[in-house]
Amino acid sequence: MDSKTHRKKAPIFIKIILENTIKQGRLEIPSGFVTEFGNSLSNPIILEVPTGKKWEVEMSKVGGEDQVWLGNGWLGFSEHYSLQKGHLLVFEYQGNSHFNVLIFDMTATEIDYPGSCSRDGKSKPKMNKNKEFIDLISDQHHIQQFGGNVASCSQVNTSASNFTSSNPWFKVVLNSIGNLSVPFSFMEKHMKCETKTVILKVEDKSWPVKLNVYLSSRVAGLYAGVASFWKDNSLKQGDVCVFELIRNDIFTVSIFRI
């Protein structure tokens, strides 16, 4: 029996950076996570990114016992990694107030962390220890979203986080009209990694959309045909789309609007 398959996964929570998060200069920890693990949290909170750089951030309670925020030190972390509205952060709890943090931009691509270059100026490859962790993001059945919130300040994200299905699926938070990224790990697990036309279905309507796959860079995305899909469904920035693979190359799309 493969012990790795049955290894207990570390608890994680996910936060999407919203405009209010940037203005406030602090980040709320989901109340469900606090209820479950709050007793093990103490100051300072340690945030560690894949380069190994660690940040000390003070946590503070605002209101009830389950309202805990990352405060002093968070602004420095946010500015150093140029966090913007639509960025997605995954916090993996290691215990003892220590979190590993992965940062993804608006295209769901992991950022190039400052300081990740070697002495010869070439970028270091992303740390292999994160591969399994990154795969969790696209395999929603394994993600523990404590409190049911992807972004606790937005009702639409709460609704989207409650989505479940026995079919393979992935979730996209819309940033602006344009191409839509498809998690490459989703492609590897559930589809042939090749460029093709897929069908997106919303209720009784469907749209053919080009799915481009770039094996060398491990990038996949929906391109030609996406503009019509956006327009016909009156999609807006901040909406969440859940793509559910129901048959070969056919997705039903559930839309959660802001």
Image: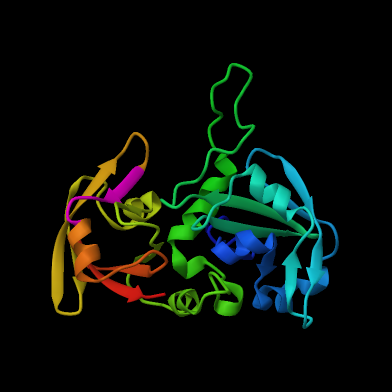
- The picture places residue 33, in percent across and down from the top left corner, at 67, 73
Quarter of the figure with residue 139: bottom left
- The picture places residue 247, in percent across and down from the top left corner, at 20, 67
Question: From this viewpoint, is residue 247 visible?
Answer: no
- The picture places residue 28, in percent across and down from the top left corner, at 68, 68
Is residue 47 placed above or below 255 in the rendered structure?
above
Question: From this viewpoint, is residue 126 visible?
Answer: yes
Which colouring convention does the figure follow? rainbow
**Residue toward you, 77 or 165:** 77
Residue lying at the far right of the rendered structure: 43
Label tally: 0
**Residue toward you, 17 or 196:** 17
**Residue toward you, 76 or 96:** 76
Which residue is at a point 56% across and 50% down the rendered structure image? 103
On screen, residue 111 versus residue 236, left or right, reads right
Quarter of the figure with residue 74: bottom right
Residue lying at the far bottom of the rendered structure: 64
Residue lying at the far front of the rendered structure: 23
Tell me, yes or no, whether the highlighted magenta stretch contains residue 125: no
If the image is split into quadrants, where does the C terminus sit?
A: bottom left
**Residue toward you, 48 or 81:** 81
- The picture places residue 234, in percent across and down from the top left corner, at 26, 71
On screen, residue 116 versus residue 194, left or right, reads right
Range of residues picked out in magenta: 219-225
Which residue is at a point 63% across and 61% down the rendered structure image? 23
Which residue is at a point 68% across and 69% down the rendered structure image? 29
On screen, residue 242 versus residue 162, left or right, reads left
